[in-house]
Image (cartoon, rainbow, N blue to C red):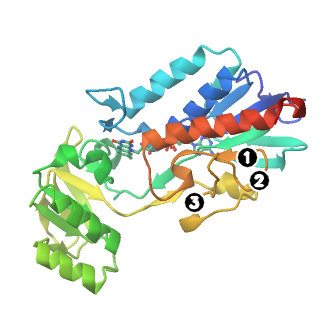
């Protein structure tokens, strides 16, 4: 337990900042706050997007790419050099309060207080579920052409999704390989007529069926099986079944949400609630990238640090 964590009912010391989420956004924020000599705790459950097997080939400074889990480990090591910063492996279940009286955060059986809150809770991906699906995420099951299109050039790709978004991604992938198929994996098919025509023109077959199981080993998919008895061979699966922003805590604080249910922030990562900041995938439907998360975490930390200054230090 961290020194700022106490059991319910005990007096609670006040952190300068509580960062919820220990992915690239939260860790970046915490390192900046630690270097501003702020007393900061990062709360993390280790289940986010940055905990899968993917290697980031587009993050600056790593010519061979870097596994996101390794990036997290390096960042945690970097943070551990600052005595007034710590990572707490707890799920924060509730948060309340305001900047005047302080914020109170709770996990099972523990309570923390903080002068500011930085939300970096990421999103929940809706990958197809089948036995052992997690082993494949980031190795042969992807969602993002920006991240993993390059390495999958020329491969046999199955796009999974039932919307225009899935159709558009299938056509974008078709510019990298001529072997693309689309599996709707849904009871409904919401691909509109113009997109359907474009898929046909590009020669991308659309399979209306549901995925039931897969063939593969060591994270490498080789085929999927469908309810209708099909066996579709593949080398990579791109899931376009969407993601849901983890906004539960933001909503508890009364933070305004923007387009598509993501947390609305200004250019300094301030939310609509004074003393509350948000960074990373949680803040927008697009730009779900480590680069953006690290940048936003740093911005949020700098804004929170300014907020924490006494009035005589502000201009
Ligand atoms: C398969 C795959 C491949 C990818 N490839 C790339 C790539 O090549 N390049 C790239 O730039 N990006 C890539 N990404 C995207 C990248 O991983 C994300 O953009 C990035 O992880 C976002 O960082 P984040 O800190 O906002 O969220 P996350 O990394 O998701 O971290 C959020 C953290 O918050 C924690 N959390 C949530 N709620 C709570 C709570 N209530 N209490 C405590 N902790 C909580 C979670 O445990 C999690 O660890 C990829 C993603 C996937 C899934």
Mark 3 nearby-residue class (10 Å; few <14, some 14–19, many ≥20): many
Decide if ligand 1 comes within 8 Å of the CB at mark 3.
no
* Residue at 80% from the left image edge and 34% from the top image edge: 308
Q: Is residue 311 left or right of residue 181?
A: right
Whole-angstrom CA distance, mark 2 to mark 1, is 6 Å
Q: Is residue 274 left or right of residue 167?
A: right
Decide if ligand 1 comes within 8 Å of the CB at mark 1.
no
Q: Which mark is residue 197?
A: none
- The residue sitting at the bottom extreme is 193
Which residue bears the numbered disc 1? 276
Give the answer, above or below, for where 71 lies relative to 291. above
Closer to the camera, 55 or 46? 55
Which residue bears the numbered disc 3? 262
Which residue bears the numbered disc 2? 273
Query: Residue 143: where, in percent of width, then height?
Result: 33, 54
Query: Residue 109: where, in percent of width, then height?
Result: 75, 37
Q: What quarter of the picture does the N terminus occupy?
A: top right
Mark 1 nearby-residue class (10 Å; few <14, some 14–19, many ≥20): many
Residue 303 seen in the current view? yes
Counting the numbered discs, the total is: 3
Whole-angstrom CA distance, mark 3 to mark 1, is 15 Å
Give the answer, above or below, for where 196 lies relative to 289. below
Label 1 residue SS? strand
* Residue at 67% from the left image edge and 34% from the top image edge: 302
Closer to the camera, 156 or 217? 156
């Amino acid at each position: 337990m961290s020194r700022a964590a106490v059991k319910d009912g005990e007096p609670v010391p006040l952190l300068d900042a509580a960062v919820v989420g220990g992915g690239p956004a939260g860790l970046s924020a915490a390192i900046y706050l630690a270097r501003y000599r702020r007393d900061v705790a990062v709360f993390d459950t280790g289940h986010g997007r940055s905990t899968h097997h993917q290697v980031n080939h587009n993050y600056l400074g790593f010519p061979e790419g870097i596994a996101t889990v390794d990036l997290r480990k390096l960042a945690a090591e970097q943070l551990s050099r600052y005595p007034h910063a710590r990572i707490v492996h707890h799920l924060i279940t509730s948060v309340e309060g305001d900047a005047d009286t302080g914020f109170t955060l709770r996990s099972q059986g523990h309570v923390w207080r903080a002068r500011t809150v930085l939300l970096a809770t990421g999103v929940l991906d809706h990958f197809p579920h089948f036995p052992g699906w997690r082993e494949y995420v980031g190795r042969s099951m992807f969602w993002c052409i920006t991240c993993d299109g390059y390495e999958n050039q020329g491969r046999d790709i199955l796009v999974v999704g039932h919307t225009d978004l899935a159709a558009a991604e299938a056509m974008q992938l078709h510019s990298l390989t001529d072997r693309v198929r689309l599996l709707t994996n849904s009871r409904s098919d919401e691909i509109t007529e113009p997109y359907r025509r474009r898929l046909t023109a590009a020669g991308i077959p659309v399979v209306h069926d549901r995925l039931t199981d897969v063939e593969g080993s060591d994270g490498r998919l080789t085929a999927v099986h469908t309810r209708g008895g099909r066996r579709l061979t593949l080398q990579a699966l791109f899931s376009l079944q969407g993601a849901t922003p983890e906004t539960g805590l933001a909503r508890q604080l009364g933070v305004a949400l923007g387009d598509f249910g993501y947390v609305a922030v200004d250019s300094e990562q301030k939310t609509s609630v004074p003393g509350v900041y948000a960074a990373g995938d949680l803040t927008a439907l697009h730009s779900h990238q480590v680069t953006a998360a690290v940048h936003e975490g740093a911005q949020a930390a700098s804004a929170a640090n300014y907020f924490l200054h006494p009035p005589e230090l502000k201009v």
